[in-house]
Image (spheres, rainbow, N blue to C red):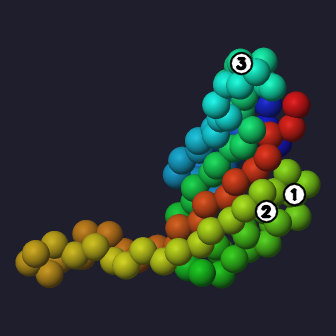
Amino acid sequence: MVELENLKQYVDNKKNAGLVSICPLYEIPTEENGANLLNTKLAETYEFANEAEADGLINEAKESPNFYSISKSYKEPKMAKNGELIKEGYYLVKIVYKVKY
């Protein structure tokens, strides 16, 4: 798992692997966690042109000791009203990792 100080470098390295967004997930403050926001998970979203690349990343992520969950979906190509292709179809992969302190 990535330390926050190294987040920019981590994101820069993952961009070439299809990373399109990264989002920390927080627990709501309670008396049990000291009434502080607690970052418990990190969600990463990737886009791939082909399913084999998406499946490769999924298999790699499942080997991580911080792995929490994965979802994969196919997004249909986007077309303009005149029939022109705006964006090719792609596979969207969302991976959630547990944050270790």
From what the image shows, is residue 90 above or below residue 66? below
Say the numbered circle drawn on residue 90: none
Quick check: 51 left or right of 40?
left
Which dot, 3 or 1, sits closer to the camera?
3
Look at mark 1 in the image and give the residue it sits on. Answer: 64
Q: CA distance from mark 3 to mark 1?
A: 30 Å
Circle 2 residues within 10 Å: few <14, some 14–19, many ≥20: some
Q: Secondary structure at mark 3?
A: loop
First in sequence, mark 3 or 1: give its number. Answer: 3
**Is 86 or 1 nearer to us in this picture?**
1
Q: Is residue 87 above or below residue 68?
A: below
- Residue at the spot x=81%, y=26% of the render? 32
Q: Residue furthest left?
A: 82
Residue picked out by circle 3: 35
Residue 84 visible in rendering: yes
Q: Would residue 87 appear left or right of 34 to someone viewing this image?
A: left
As drawn, the residue found furthest toward the front would be 31
* Quarter holding residue 54: bottom right
Q: Mark 2 is on which residue type? A: Ala
Residue bearing mark 2: 61
At x 79%, y 25%, the residue is: 33
x, y percent for residue 52? 65, 81
**Which amino acid type is marked by label 1?**
Ser
Report helix, strand or loop for mark 1: loop
Observer-nearest of 16 and 57: 57
Identity, as a three-letter code, of the amino acid under mark 3: Ala
Q: Residues within 10 Å of mark 3 (few under 14, many from 20)?
A: few
> x, y percentage for residue 96?
70, 54
**Comes first in the chain, label 3 or label 2:** 3
Residue 97 falls left or right of residue 82 = right
Circles 1 and 2: CB atoms closer than 8 Å: yes
